[in-house]
Image (cartoon, helix red, strand yellow):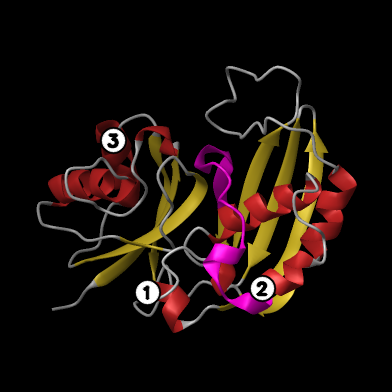
Amino acid sequence: MKEYKYKMQISYDGTNYFGWQIQKNKLTIQEAIQKNLSKILGEDIKIIAAGRTDAKVHALEQVAHFSYTKKLDLKKVIFSLNSLLPLDIRIKNITQVDTNFHARFSAKSKIYSYHIFVGNVEDPFSRMYSYKPNYKFDLDLLKKASKRFLGTHNFSSFANKQYTGSAANNPIKTIKRIDIKKRKNEIILEFEADGFLYKMVRNIVGTLLDVANEKLPLDMIEKIIKAKDRKKASKPAEPQGLFLVKVLY
């Protein structure tokens, strides 16, 4: 039987969810979309994402795919799905793709951004979408420290679940760029890499902030990377500041 494959572009506010991946007795993005898509199409549908975001992490454009035995009226499916989904999850687009397409394995790189609030008083309207440290830190030192992560490295020291999943199979990733921008009361760190390990961005941000706060010396970064030991790196930055921005194919 012929199957058609469809690519979904999804945006969501992760505040009320326990991440992307389905978990028993917990509200997740994947479950919400699969349940409603299955209802619309009249059969059990499994969707596979480009990557799993953690609890309270957001996505400007997550990508997922699913297969179905019929050609779909995509505008109708998008409308129906958005009508059923909660307002904090939106299907931006669905397109038919080649059957060889895979949301995760076809990806060339991913872009994440991390938002740090640096105003004197936390903004009640951005507190679910940024992290406010309770200490001062040196922005120039943050920029210097970020350059130490560029290039191809074994990032085991920055992976939770170091001995399972992608961290066990392939902990070597290439960070192509880390751009640091100041916007009003926010500092935004934007990461682009060919892939990320579990909690890798948050663990790197936590370490960068410890260096910028002079809790860790700058030259410790290379030592932490070489150690390949999660215990050597800092605690992860809070999840609400993290956004999956885009997946590139």
User: Residue 153: within the magenta?
Assistant: no
Q: Nearer the viewer, residue 117 or 66?
A: 117
Depth check: give the residue in front, 198 or 190: 198
Residue 85 shows which numbered tag?
3
- Gap in angstroms between the C-alphas marked 3 and 2: 41 Å
Q: Is residue 128 above or below residue 107?
A: above
CA distance for labels 1 and 3: 32 Å
| Image mark for residue 25 | none
Q: Is residue 100 above or below residue 29?
A: below
Residue at 43 percent of width and 62 percent of height: 51
Mark pair 1, 2: CA separation: 18 Å
| Closer to viewer: mark 3 or mark 2 | 2
- Which x, y percent locates residue 21? 31, 54
Q: Please give the range of residues in magenta.
A: 225-245
Q: Is residue 142 above or below residue 247?
A: above
Q: Amino acid at mark 2?
A: Ile
Is residue 117 among the parts visible in the rendering?
yes
Q: Can you tell which of label 1 and label 3 is closer to the viewer? A: 1
Locate the N terminus by quadrant. bottom left
Q: Amino acid at mark 3?
A: Leu
Report the label total. 3
Residue underneath mark 1: 164
**Labels 1 and 2: the sequence-earlier one:** 1
Is 234 colored magenta in this rendering?
A: yes
Q: What residue is shown with label 2?
A: 225
